């Protein structure tokens, strides 16, 4: 059978698809590790569809189709000058198991499958990651004639509602951290709150080299400016946990257990970032521009979602006028 189970692939094992046949005198070989979490039934369905496609192409019944991987490769080769190139390349690495070996006209199915296989990801994370794939396919079609049309018109993206945020006070974040039994995950929670960094894109990618004295040196922002974040004294005890080398799903599983234990089922890891912004604006007199710089926003537009806290701070300042000391 072309699929087999590899128990040493990934954290819990994965299915592998293999094809090695002689068709019309031509030896055709291919091997592909299928995404984590696939059941035997799903792997067998892929086996039947992919084997039929290979036979059809090799027999001349069907013309070889251009692959998503080809479009991604061309896109990466031509976008090395972008400030976010390293992040973009990493996103494609994370997406690769879902689009590996898939034709361009499979991209709608790829987007559906990725969202379905990763329900633990925030909708914004899935949407942003798939947006890179869409950009690559459109670029390859428009600039290099890869494919006979733009196949991204039927891609599905999860709905993201950025207006509905959960904000927690510092005492609540500390209670959440104490409820976390895994010490590495507890460190991630605390670093996320006291820096406002995104946990997957920022904290999980940290190495010891990112620690420069009392600063986190995180390279450069999209506008080319250095991204330096002060290390709060409360974090010194957690720095020894860096780098975080387990799979992000492992950390999020511990986080989910902690939020249930703390009675906060509504929070996500991204809540730490929102909570820091609200804490600085509502309790410590910060303004939107200062918060934007701390969060690494390159414009105030992204920070404007916290404007209600900024207004409260301004109101408090104005109300102090005329008060007796």
Image: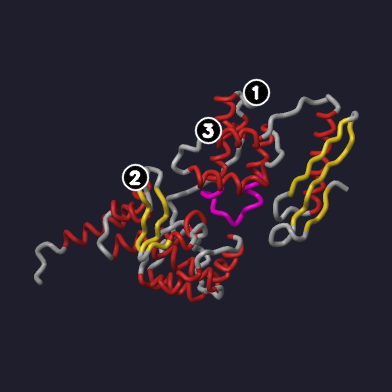
Q: CA distance from mark 3 to mark 2?
A: 26 Å
Left or right side of 232 for 319 = left
With 46 as the anchor, is 245 left or right in this view?
left
> 10 Å neighbourhood of mark 2: few (<14), some, or many (≥20)?
few
Main SS class of the magenta portion in the image: helix
Q: Disc 3 or 2, which lies upstream in sequence?
A: 3
Q: Is 209 included in the stretch rendered in magenta?
A: no
The first of marks 1 and 2 along the sequence is: 1
* Corner quadrant of residue 192: bottom left
In the image: residue 30, left or right of residue 172 = right
Along the viewing direction, whichever of 311 and 110 lies nearer the viewer = 110
Q: Nearer the viewer, mark 3 or mark 1?
A: 3
Disc on res. 78? 3
SS category of the residue bearing label 2: loop
Point 86% across, 27% down: residue: 59
Helix, strand or loop status at disc 1: loop
Residue at the spot 36% in from the left edge and 56% down from the top edge: 228
Q: Residues within 10 Å of mark 1 (few under 14, many from 20)?
A: few
Q: Magenta residues? A: 113-126
Residue 139 location (% of width, % of height): 55, 30
User: Secondary structure under badge 3?
Assistant: helix
Q: Which mark is residue 299?
A: 2
User: Which residue was labeled with disc 1?
Assistant: 148
Quarter occupied by the C terminus: bottom left
Mark 3: few/some/many CA within 10 Å (<14, 14-19, 20+) = few
Q: Earlier in the sequence, mark 3 or mark 1?
A: 3
């Amino acid at each position: 059978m072309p699929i087999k189970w590899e128990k040493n692939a990934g954290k819990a094992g994965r299915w592998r698809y293999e094809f090695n046949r002689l068709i019309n005198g031509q030896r055709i070989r291919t091997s592909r590790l299928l995404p984590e979490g696939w059941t035997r039934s799903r792997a067998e369905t892929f086996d039947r569809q992919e084997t039929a496609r290979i036979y059809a192409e090799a027999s001349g019944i069907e013309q070889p189709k251009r692959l998503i991987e080809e479009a991604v490769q061309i896109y990466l080769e031509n976008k090395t000058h972008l400030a976010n190139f390293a992040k973009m390349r990493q996103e494609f690495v994370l997406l690769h198991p879902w689009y590996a070996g898939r034709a361009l006209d499979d991209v709608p199915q790829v987007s559906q499958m990725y969202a379905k296989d990763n329900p633990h990801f925030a909708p914004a994370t899935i949407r942003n990651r798939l947006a890179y794939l869409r950009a690559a396919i459109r670029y390859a079609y428009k600039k290099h004639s890869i494919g006979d049309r733009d196949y991204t018109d039927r891609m599905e993206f999860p709905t993201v509602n950025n207006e509905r945020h959960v904000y927690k006070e510092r005492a609540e974040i500390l209670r959440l951290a104490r409820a976390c039994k895994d010490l590495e995950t507890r460190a991630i929670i605390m670093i996320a709150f006291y820096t406002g960094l995104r946990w997957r894109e920022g904290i999980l990618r940290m190495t010891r080299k990112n620690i420069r004295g009392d600063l986190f040196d995180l390279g450069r922002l999209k506008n080319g400016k250095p991204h330096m974040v002060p290390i709060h004294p409360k974090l010194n005890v957690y720095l020894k946990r860096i780098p975080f080398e387990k799979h992000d799903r492992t950390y999020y599983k511990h986080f989910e257990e902690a939020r249930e234990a703390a009675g906060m089922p509504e929070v996500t890891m991204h809540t730490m970032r929102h909570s820091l912004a609200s804490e600085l604006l509502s309790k410590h007199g910060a303004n939107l521009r200062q918060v934007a710089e701390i969060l690494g926003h390159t414009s105030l537009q992204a920070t404007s979602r916290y404007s209600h806290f900024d207004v409260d701070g301004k109101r408090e300042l104005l109300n102090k006028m005329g008060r007796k000391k």
